[in-house]
Amino acid sequence: MNRKRLFLQDEASTEQTKPTFKVVMAYDSRSAGTRAMNVFSGLVREFGDEFEFHCGLWRFDVLGLPKTREEAVRAGIAADLFIVAARCDTDLPSPVQFWLDQCVAEKGPRSAGLVALLESRQTFGDFQCQTRQHLQRIADRAGLDFFCHEARSQRASPVLSSETLKDRASTVSSVLEGILHRRETPPRWRM
């Protein structure tokens, strides 16, 4: 019995442990978080046999909370890969910039990668994406490998002006028209 236990312990101690690959992700919206998680899932699918993956996920607004940002900075300093998923139409919020700057200040050249997953409602050739430029500068300054994926948003943002609201309010659908011009009263429940 003791011999069998020793054999199992020896077998367990000779097992090879996989190296750890730490990924931290920051995102600005639910859809951006989903895109970041899809990239992470793809990495796990592709390289899960070679690495043990660890993931930290932070929404932009919580990086504005000092204690949360401190935790995210600690995770970022230890990270092998940063994924930032954001809209390209706006600048990165200052707490996110501060977080990234603190994380990469501790990194050596070629010690990590920075992935930018950017989305815009405009065509990328039509404008200069400030977020991409900012992330590229951070990566260049720290000597990180930079990867960027830009996608056009499928969902167009409705333009809300007084004219469009007035048009929408005055539009009567055929269903509404039928209800408004119904001659008979609909039956009601009776007790």
Image: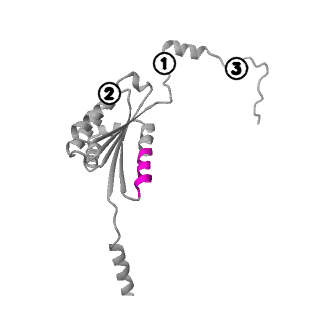
Against 16, residue 92 (above or below) is above
* Label 3 to label 1: alpha-carbon separation: 24 Å
Magenta highlight: main SS: helix
Residue at 50% of width from left, 25% of height from top? 156
**Relative to 89, 190 lies left or right:** right
Percent x, y of residue 31: 45, 37
Q: Which amino acid type corresponds to the residue marked 2 in the rendered image?
A: Gln
SS class, disc 1: loop
**Residue identified by numbered label 1:** 160
The boundaries of the magenta stretch are 38-48
Quadrant location, the C terminus: top right
* Label 2 to label 1: alpha-carbon separation: 25 Å
* Between 81 and 185, the one nearer to me in the picture: 81
**Residue identified by numbered label 2:** 130
**Residue identified by numbered label 3:** 174
**Relative to 19, 182 lies left or right:** right
Residue at 39% of width from left, 87% of height from top? 1
Residue at 41% of width from left, 42% of height from top? 36
Percent x, y of residue 139: 26, 38
Q: Splitting the image into 4 quarters, where does residue 178 fall?
A: top right
Q: Splitting the image into 4 quarters, where does residue 64 fall?
A: top left
Mark sitting earlier along the chain (2/1):
2
Task: Tell me if label 3 and label 1 are in contact, CB under 8 Å.
Answer: no
* Between 179 and 57, the one nearer to me in the picture: 57
Against 133, residue 169 (above or below) is above
